[in-house]
Image (tube, helix red, strand yellow):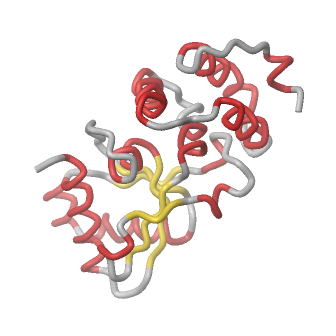
Amino acid sequence: MQYWQKLHEYLQEIDNKLDRPLEVTIIGGAALILKYHHVRVTYDIDILNAPDARMLSSFVEQHKALNEKYKIPIHVIDSSFFPVTDDFLEKRVRYAEDAFKNLKVLILDLYDLILSKLDRCNSKDRDDIQWLKENFIIDVERLIKAYQEGRRNALNPGRVDGNFLYILDAVFGKTMSEEELLEE
């Protein structure tokens, strides 16, 4: 069984136990695996903080059998830690619409997914961004504009500026000064 199938099966089991509709936005490694077909492993599912996200996290904790079977914890992440565009909620993409009865799974679009990797920006995050660049067409100018817009929404924008400039240079081969980046 491929890893994406394990994640999908886990979500299906959650869906089968739900007694009402629930909407969640998956980010991070699980999003890369499920929607963008990245062949890698993740040890958790990160979902954006929202009322349904907290309910899902609590729901999974209450269903110990699911935890024991899959050993994939669900973490609720606050989007203010990374720069996302103003309209990121509208740009999310649906995952496997026909596979679930009550669970509506949404995933960040490609650009916001890249931006979501900038706060931590560890080697796995950088590898993920490199993989996205190698497997999808990413317009660097659009990415810069998305970052400039999203930067306003980040809790600590100064922290992610250096990470973004590093990613621009190391992954996309574009060198920019911080002054150029902050000019809008």
Quarter occupied by the C terminus: top right
Residue 62's x, y, as percent? Answer: 29, 70
For residue 124, which quarter of the picture?
top left
Q: In this view, does 149 lie above or below 66?
A: above
Left of 107 or right of it: where is 181?
Answer: right
Residue 31 place in picture, x, y as percent: 41, 49
Q: Residue 147, relative to residue 57: is it above or below?
A: above
Q: In this view, does 172 lie to the left or right of 53?
A: right
Residue 133 pos. (x, y %)? 48, 30
Q: Position of residue 48 (x, y in %)?
A: 53, 56
Total marks placed: 0
Residue at image point 10% right, 50% down = 1
Instruction: Name the foreground residue: 87 vs 63.
Output: 87
Nearer to me, 119 or 138: 138
As rendered, which of 77 and 2 lies closer to the eye?
2
Quadrant assignment, res 127? top left
Q: Residue placed at 20% from the left, 47% from the top? A: 3
**Which residue reaches farthest right?**
183
| Residue at x-position 71% and y-position 48% | 85
Residue located at (24% from left, 51% from top): 4
Report the side of 147 relative to 71 (left or right). right
Q: Residue furthest bottom?
A: 19
Q: Which residue lies furthest to the left in this view?
A: 1
* Residue 182 versus residue 114 in the image, above or below: above
